Amino acid sequence: MSNKEAAYVGSIDQGTTSTRFIIYDRSARPVGSHQIEFTQFYPEAGWVEHDPMEILESVRVCIAKAIDKATADGHNVDSGLKAIGLTNQRETTLLWSKSTGYPLHNAIVWMDVRTSSICRKLEKELAGGRTHFVEVCGLPISTYFSAVKLLWLMENVDAVKEAVKVGDALFGTIDAWLIWNLTGGVNGGIHATDVSNASRTMLMNLKTLDWDKPTLETLGIPAEILPKIVSNSELIGKISKGWAVSGVPISGCLGDQHAAMVGQACRKGEAKSTYGTGAFILLNTGEEIIQSTHGLLTTLAFKLGPEAPTNYALEGSIAIAGAAVQWLRDGLGIISSASEIEELALKVETTGGVYFVPAFNGLFAPWWRDDARGVCIGITRFTSKAHIARAVLESMCFQVKDVLDSMHKDAGEEGEVKNEKGEFLLMVDGGATVNNLLMQIQADLLGSPVVRPADIETTALGAAYAAGLAVGFWTEDEIFASEEKCKSATIFRSTLNDELRKKKVESWCKAVSRTFDLADLSL
C-alpha cells in the first residue's frame, strides 16, 4: 500500500455502558468517532442485563455517524476503509435463534450474580471444588464467567430450552453476536469468537485453544451451540449488505482488556490497568502459563495471527471501579457528572479516616467473595461529601494495589520488567485516567510509577491494530514501538512515605474484612 493513499482502519468498541466506533489513519490518529450509551436493566438485586438488539442498533448508528464525521472533515473513508476490528465487554452471555436472528433472552452481563446458587452447587458436586476447572481453563468457578450464565439460561428460560433441543440456539459473548450479525445474520452469518473472549467462558482449554470436551460434558453444554474459535488477528469475514461498511473485512477481534494490552504494546513482563466500569489489571507472562496461587486468573493475553505465538497473562479483575463514581452521581446525587469527582475530592487532603469498599455485587480478585457487599466505614460528624468522594477514588486504587501485590508474588522477579532505576511501571488507560488525582493516589499507594499514554482509549486502538495487522496495514514492529509512545506519556510518581502507606493499607484491609458475609442481610 502506498503511504500517499488515504487508508483507514475502523474499530468497534462495545463496552459495558456504551458503544463507540473510531476510525484511525495510518499514524493511528483518530479521524472520526461516535459514541452512544445504552440501557442497563436491573430486574432484581444483583442482576444486570443488556438488550442485544439495542446493542446491535448502537453499533449500526455509531458506524454511520463516525463515517459522516470523518467524511465531513475531508477523509475519504468510504473507499479508504481497509479493515474493521472489534473489541467488547467480556463474559456477557446471550443465546439467539439461528432461524429468526432474535435473542432468546436479554444478555446476562459479566457483573451479574444471579448464578451464585449454580456456583455453590458445582463447588459441592465437583471433586476439585471451586478450582475444579482451573488446570484446564485458568478460571475458578464464579458468577463472573460465561459458562454458569449459560447454564442459568438453559435451566430457567423456556425459549432457550426449546431452541437448544431443536438445534436452533447459538451461544456467544457480545463479539460473536456482533460478528454473526455483521456478516449476514440469518443469511449465512459467521458464528465465531476469538481466543481471548473464549478464554473467559470457563469452557476453553488454555493449551489447545479449543473448547474443552470433558468440561462441556461435565456441565452438560452441547458443543454445537458454541462458535468456532479464531485468533485475534485474521480475516474472520466480510461485512454484509445493509451496513454502511459492507464488503470491508472484519480482521481483528479481542475482549476489551486484551485489546488494551495490544493498544498499550504490553510485552512479556509488562502490566496494564484499565479503569472503566470495573478495573482490570493484566501482566503479560509471554508463552508461559502461570497458575496463580494468590487469587488471580490465568488467561490468554493475545494471539496476533493463526500461526502467531500465544501470549498468556495473569489477570486481576475488579468489578466496581468507575461504576462507584456513577453510583455517587446517579444513586446518591453527590455529583452531577463523573468529571466533578476530582474537584470535589480535592477540597480535602485526606479521607478523614473514611474507607469505602464498593463490593456492590461481591468482590472479585484477589478475594473472590460473592457474599461481600459494600461498606463505608470511619464516618464521623466531621465527614463531608468531599471525604466520601476521595474515599471512592482511593477504593479504586486500593483494589488495584491488592491485585498488583498478588501479581508480584505470582510472577516473581524474573516475570516482571523493570526500568533502569529498578522500578516496575504500571501502564494505565481507560476513561477514568483523565483524573489526575486518581492517578496520583494510585502511584502513592503503589509506591511505584504510573504511566498514562497520550491516547488513553487504548482498547479501541488495540482492536484497530489487530485488524490492521491482519491486512498488512501495520506491522508488528510498528504496533510495539513503545519507545515512541513513552515520549508522549505522563508519569505519576509516589509522594507518600512508606510508613503512612503501610498504615493506610492496613486500614483498607480491615475495611475489606467488614464486607464479608453480608449478602443475606434482609431487604
Image (cartoon, grey):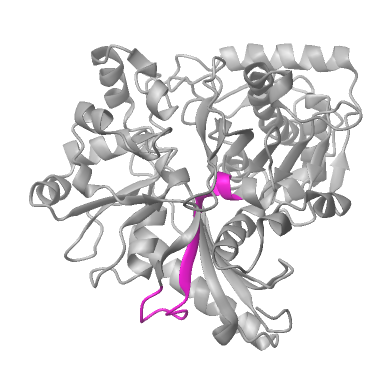
71 sits to left or right of 374? right
Residue 509 to residue 206: above or below: above
Magenta residues, as a range?
239-259
Residue drawn at 43 percent across, 33 percent down: 206
| Residue 267 in picture, x, y percent from top left | 69, 40
| Residue 200 in picture, x, y percent from top left | 43, 38
Quadrant location of the N terminus?
A: bottom right
234 sits to left or right of 381? left
| Residue 41 in picture, x, y percent from top left | 39, 49
Evaluate whether residue 147 shows in this view: yes
Q: Can you tell which quarter of the image residue 521 is in?
A: top left
17 sits to left or right of 167? right
Quadrant location of the C terminus?
A: top left
Residue at the far front: name it.
307
Q: Can you tell which quarter of the image residue 421 is in?
A: top right
Residue drawn at 67 percent across, 83 percent down: 6
334 sits to left or right of 82? right
313 part of magenta stretch? no
Residue drawn at 57 percent across, 42 percent down: 323
Seen from the viewer's position, the closer of residues 164 and 507 is 164
Residue 522 to residue 91: above or below: above
Q: Can you tell which quarter of the image residue 10 is in?
A: bottom right
User: How many numbered discs, if any?
Assistant: 0
| Residue 73 in picture, x, y percent from top left | 70, 85
Seen from the viewer's position, the closer of residues 227 and 469 is 469
255 part of magenta stretch? yes
Seen from the viewer's position, the closer of residues 174 and 501 is 174
